[in-house]
Amino acid sequence: MSSLSLRGLEKRFGAHAAVHDLSLEVQDGEFMCLLGPSGCGKTTTLRMIGGFETPDGGDIRIDGRAVTALPPERRPTAMVFQRYNLWPHMSVAGNVAFGLRVRRLPKAQIEAKVAEVLALVGLPDAAAKYPHQLSGGQQQRIAVARALVLEPKILLLDEPFSNLDARLRVRMREEVKQLQRAIGITTVFVTHDQEEALTIADRIAVMREGVLEQVDTPQRLYTHPRTTFVADFIGTMNLIPARVERRAGLVTAGPWRLPLPAVTWPDGAAGTLAVRPEDLAIEPAGTAAAAHVRRVINLGHYLQVLVDVRDAGTLRLFVGKEAPPPEGATIGIRVVRGLLFNDGEPVEVEGERPAVVTRGGANTSPATGR
Amino acid sequence: MAVRAPAARPPAGGSPQGRRRAWKEGALGLGLVLPPLLVLVFLIVLPAANAIVDTLTPDPAVKGLTPMLYARLLGSRIVRSDIVFTVVVTLVSVAVTFGLSYPLALYLRFARGRLAALLAVLFTIPLFVPVVIASFAMITFLVNHGVISTVLYRLGVERFPPLVYNATGIVLTQVWASLPFAVLILGAGLQAIDDSLIDGARDVGAGRLRTFGSIILPLNVTPTMIALTLLFINVFGSFTIPYLVGGNAPQMLGVTMTNYLTQYLRRSEAVTMAVMAFAISAVVGAVYVLSVSRRERGAA
Amino acid sequence: MSPGWFWAVEGLRRAIGLGAFLALAAFILGPLVTLLLWAFAGSWLFPNLLPEFSLKWWAYVLANGDVTKAIRMSVESAPIATLLSALICVPAAYAFARLRFPGRRALLLSFLSANAFPKIGLYVSIATLFYRLNLMDTFAGVVLIQMVNTLLFMIWIPTGTFRGINTNLEEAARDAGAGPLRTFFQITLPIALPGLIVAVLFAFLAAFDEAQGTLIVGTPNHITMPVMMYTLVLSYPQPVGAVFSVLLSLPSLAFLLVAQRYLRAGYLAAGYSL
């Protein structure tokens, strides 16, 4: 049970800064994901924690003790790589026992620990086998076992399931999550798959081009992204160019006019409105902004609808499967809520309320308080 | 959980630990490489440099460097004809070997089945036969009243040109000995060309010849250059094969210089010829080194 | 894989292929078979297709004192040259493959470039150096000459082998608590072993079969088997040379059998493709 602290980490390869000024606190027993596109520096960061790269600046502390100067064999960390974990010339038992032998534990104790950890990962009969006799998923499980048998303070995983096929990947990450919960070991897991991170992490650190964009729980990352990058990277997001119209007290985004929230932005300021697909509602044609239905994708339990909206581009909606809009038709789309990004912190924006049709047939949108 | 904007430029200089580690790694690397490097210098660089200097200062009475020895040797008609002979035999051997090995390498790359498997074993056999034995075997095979001669005689052919103790014998033996080497290098290059590249060409309608010319040949240029230059250097500087299988005159340079050294005891002339052979090979060798260094950069 | 796409018309191509194969087989195997027949020939008169068989030349060769001396010289010098090369070259190969140090590429290239010089020229130059150092006609001189040939193989092939081992495997060992030395001996070396064996095989054969340099440096008292061959070929009846050839081939044959396992295209080609 240990805490991990990264302060101001720097790593350069030539002139290129792979990691810049990265600071992160991982709590005792937490499952932290480092998430980002390729090249964002997440693996480099992980390797610095494990001791395989030396930082050019900053330091790393485990339980308050600085480990930056320690080589990998003396750090209380254990790493599971993406590939080439198991030594091909040793049996599974040999692989798992290697670290224990280095520590000169007595033979009987080694055997007991090996058996115990193999049972833990669900492969109790694999001890005498050789890596080439195991499937990819089994090999990764043994790699996890080998890491855990040393009872490290921090468990590091570098996209360990990327090489497995999709269903196996889902199953393996569930197993790792359960294992981690049961043992309570502080874990750092690197992935480029945001769905994977959202599923298993306690908190996620989103990285881009060597820099930390946001660290938060999956839920908050989803509902309160702090930059357009995070907004776009996590889940699906519609991004619409927006503009402040101070005098009218509105924000215009595409065909929509939304009430301006309490901000100090000047008139004419340009920003981005980020709207989740589930925050766009379908209205009868003519009662809300016009949208041309390009495609309806049936995903079994819900529908994804792709629409073209003038001045807003192609947007994506998630709707229930009750009343699928026909492809090629024109429908109305209403913004329920969104996030407005300019400089600094994004601001929540409430959408217009649905239009009310008056007796006379004229269509009036009630001005929201103005 | 503050969000930072990416910095404009990273600060210069690494951490003290980083620099120390890099320094230690560098020192260790150089230290490990030192022993074979010293042997290399002692066995190759030093003698070669020595030889070059010695040949340029043959007469203690003459101060400074003089190409006297070279002029004298090149003045000898015998030596000149030996040089020409060596170059011609080398070029022919390389051409024939290349002409045989490329199709072989291609066949082994694309064909499947028992014949290909057998062939794969067959072509490696000369690799395991010492050159001395190979030369001798060729002699017994090709000599007048040897096996070929007997078979042809039985088939009714009574006269045919001599196949040994002349340039023909040398070429045939060089081809025999160089074949596996060439096939291996070319084959390794062909192996590196993914099937999908070739299937892709076929898919858009390219025929066999077109695929070979436009896809395979260009992608295999570096191994081809390596094979050609190594073949040239090997044959050019060979001794055993021309010594045993060749005639008395003209001779290949390797034999000439050895005779000058061990039989006529004219050491300086022998070394001068060695340096001339170096020079000619150096030009070809430069091509080799460039090809290898290009491959190294790719692999590194 | 697209088997057979290279051949359009099946039957004709097959016939040509078979014909070419037989021609090649005759070219490659013919001389060797001939030599083998000569080794067991009492006498072979033209135009008989086969000789009269006899073992008398074996008795002749094996009774020859010079022959046994040459055999002993070969058997003593080649393993030593190979072992020495392995000892100094394998760590260097690891350095070339894994470590970063100044001049790494240039130095590796310089080893490979030593191949760019005609060997006979080198031997002639080395001879003049050896004269000065009193290394002519000595055991040490012969071993050094053999090392000129082994050095290249023992750097070339092991460097490729070590490069081919994914660094994760070594990092995992460090991660588990092993220091650099233990990692090298317990992880890297065992995994590299097949490639290293191939390198040792080639190096040994290169040392054992070395003739040109030893002819210059080892005459007259330190003659190896290949050097002896020169005399036998030039000055003795054909069966004598043939018998000796069989003797000289024995190590190569032995290695061929042992190496069958490791002689997958990858290893051989890896060595040659560097």
Image: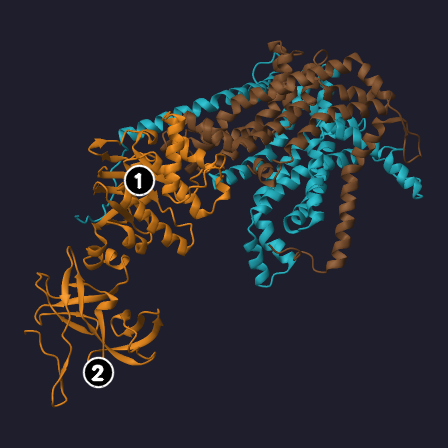
Chain colours: A orange, B cyan, C brown
In this orientation, does residue B256 appear? yes
Which quadrant of the figure contains the C terminus of chain A? bottom left
State whether discs 2 and 1 lie on one chain: yes
What amino acid does circle 2 point to?
Gly
What amino acid does circle 1 point to?
Leu
Q: Nearer the viewer, residue B94 or C29?
A: C29
- Residue B14 occupies quadrant: top left
Q: Residue at x 42, y 30 (%)?
A: C99
For disc 2, the chain is: A
Locate residue C244 relative to residue A243 in the image: left or right. Answer: right
Q: Which mark is residue A286?
A: 2
Give x and y (percent) for residue C137: 67, 11
Locate residue A58 relative to residue C41 in the image: left or right. Answer: left
Q: Residue at x 18, y 70 (%)?
A: A336
Q: Earlier in the sequence, mark 2 or mark 1?
A: 1
Tag 2 secondary structure: loop
